[in-house]
Amino acid sequence: MIRVTVVRKNGNITGYYAKGHAEYAELGSDIVCAAASTAMQNPLAGMQEVLRLNPQYGFDDDGYITVTLDRMDFQGKEREVSSLLETMVVMIRELERNYPKNIKLVEKEEK
């Protein structure tokens, strides 16, 4: 199962990461994995390529993504970034609803 964790502070997303495998189908044919990967990489690409921002991110050896925004200079584009991130959450929720055995969304509120 893929576990996507979204971290929030005061309701705003400050980061997200994923661990695990969907195990819906064989490697290279797993539509849940492909959809989750696309959903999580889309806001990152939007921040970099469209908004010209520099979020901290990384991929580990298994291809798991980690994105951290708490130190990013938003350059006044907080609303645009929030739209990208909240759209990702909607997409992951929909995947979780349709494939509950393969993906789970966890939302954590930082203090």
Image: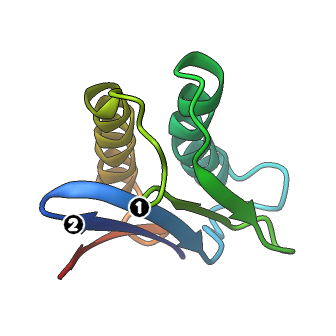
Q: Is residue 62 above or below residue 41?
A: below
Disc on the earlier residue, 1 or 2: 2
Q: How is the image coloured?
A: rainbow
User: Dot 1 surroundings within 10 Å: few (below 14), some, or many (20 or more)?
Assistant: some
Q: Residue at x 76, y 64 (%)?
A: 59
Quadrant of the frame with the C terminus: bottom left
Towards the viewer: 45 or 40: 45
Q: Residue at x 80, y 62 (%)?
A: 26
Q: Which residue is mark 2?
A: 9
Q: Is residue 4 above or below residue 35?
A: below
Mark 1 or 2: in front is 1
Query: CA–CA distance between discs 1 and 2?
Result: 9 Å
The amino acid type, in three-letter code, at marker 1 is: Asp
Quadrant of the frame with the N terminus: bottom right
Residue 48's spot in the image, x, y percent?
63, 30
Left or right for 93, reference 52: left
Residue 8's spot in the image, x, y percent?
25, 65
Q: Which residue is mark 1?
A: 70
Residue 66's spot in the image, x, y percent?
60, 65
In the image, farthest residue toward the left: 10
Left or right for 96, reference 36: left
Left or right for 71, reference 54: left
Residue 41's spot in the image, x, y percent?
61, 42
Towards the viewer: 65 or 76: 76
Q: Residue at x 79, y 72 (%)?
A: 60
